[in-house]
Image (cartoon, helix red, strand yellow):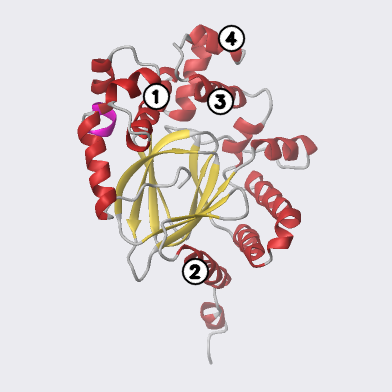
Amino acid sequence: MPDPRSSDALAPDPLARLRESMIHSIGSRTAGLTDWRSPIANLTFFRRERPMPPCICLVEPSIILVVQGEKQMLVGGEAYPYDIHRFLITSLDLPANSQVMRASADQPCLGLALKLDLRVMAELIAQGGLPLPAERSQDKAGGVGLGAVTPPLLESFKRLLDLLDDPAAIPVLAPLIEREIHYRLLRGEQAPRLWQIAAVGSQGHRIARAIDWLKLNYTRTLRIEDLAAHVQMSTSSLHQHFRQLTAMSPLQYQKWLRLNEARRLMLNAHRDAASAAFEVGYESPSQFSREYARLFGAPPKRDIETLRSHAATGRHEQGIPSA
């Protein structure tokens, strides 16, 4: 007599059906591209057709979902691999390295990044009714983590992608589905990571405000006392919680912002190294060159020449900020 449980083993995987539909949606829109910004403001698709070494990027608060292939995010010396079973989530603007682990021309790495809205999460928390999150994990960088891809979450994303075939519905329905996704995240295993940032008055919320200030004022001389006062924290508490969430000190974070903006100016605006250094707040070109080489592995001139050479031959693909 056949084992009745065997029918369960042969039953179609509902997640597989959802993924196949999403693979088609993302794949058809990214053919010949590496990134595609959708008409849904916070939604970006990515496509990579070969494994790639780590690419420096600033990751916005996002959920990043892979529907085919595998990627990895490196933050604070720790690796966070994610694939069709695990999503990556970040609750702060984090300096990171994004790496493509598994991809080919026949089976490209396909996925999406949805920028999270901390105001929406704060509203959902304030409404009440959400279960209080358990103790958060002690990751080296508390602003990034991995979560299991569940049927309700994937179904929400599938409905969001379906709106791309009905553009007139996007302004009305996309915000509702995005709100649902935020709600599901706040009920999931990564809820503690999001609560600590979105809950107004929390230490994590203050660190998010400190990061916003640094992004606007990275060219200015940084006085930790002033930054701490701005976010209503003591200097010791600011240092402790900032490093806990970003795996960096505020000064290291500012330096990272400066160096990456200088790189952008040299690459896209054709500034020379000295001009770029002064424009982002450096007073010493030699200090700028040392710190630039430490971060990017080569002095400014050689690094920019390499980037341009790779771009000219089609061998260089910049990672998108949130993937």
Of marks 3 and 1, the one in the foreground: 1
Which residue is the site of mark 2? 28
Q: Are marks 2 and 1 in contact (CB under 8 Å)?
A: no
Task: Calculate the distance from the C-alpha at mark 3 to the C-alpha at mark 2.
Answer: 36 Å
* Magenta part of the chain: 293-297
Residue 231 vertical placement versus 197 (above, below): above
- Residue drawn at (51%, 7%) of the image: 225
The part of the image, by quadrant, that contains residue 152 is: bottom right
Tag 2: Cα neighbours inside 10 Å, few (<14), some, or many (≥20)? few
Amino acid under disc 3:
Asp
The label on residue 235 is: none
The percent position of residue 304, horizontal first and vertical second, equals 26, 36
Tag 1: Cα neighbours inside 10 Å, few (<14), some, or many (≥20)? many
Q: Residue furthest bottom?
A: 1
- Residue drawn at (56%, 73%) of the image: 17
Which residue is the site of mark 3? 212
Amino acid under disc 4:
Ala
**Helix, strand or loop for disc 2:** helix
Task: Name the dominant secondary structure of the magenta segment.
Answer: helix
Q: Earlier in the sequence, mark 2 or mark 1?
A: 2
Amino acid under disc 1:
Arg
* Between 148 and 172, the one nearer to me in the picture: 172
Q: Earlier in the sequence, mark 3 or mark 4?
A: 3
Tag 4: Cα neighbours inside 10 Å, few (<14), some, or many (≥20)? few
Q: Earlier in the sequence, mark 2 or mark 4?
A: 2
Which residue is the site of mark 1? 258
Residue 159 vertical placement versus 174 (above, below): below
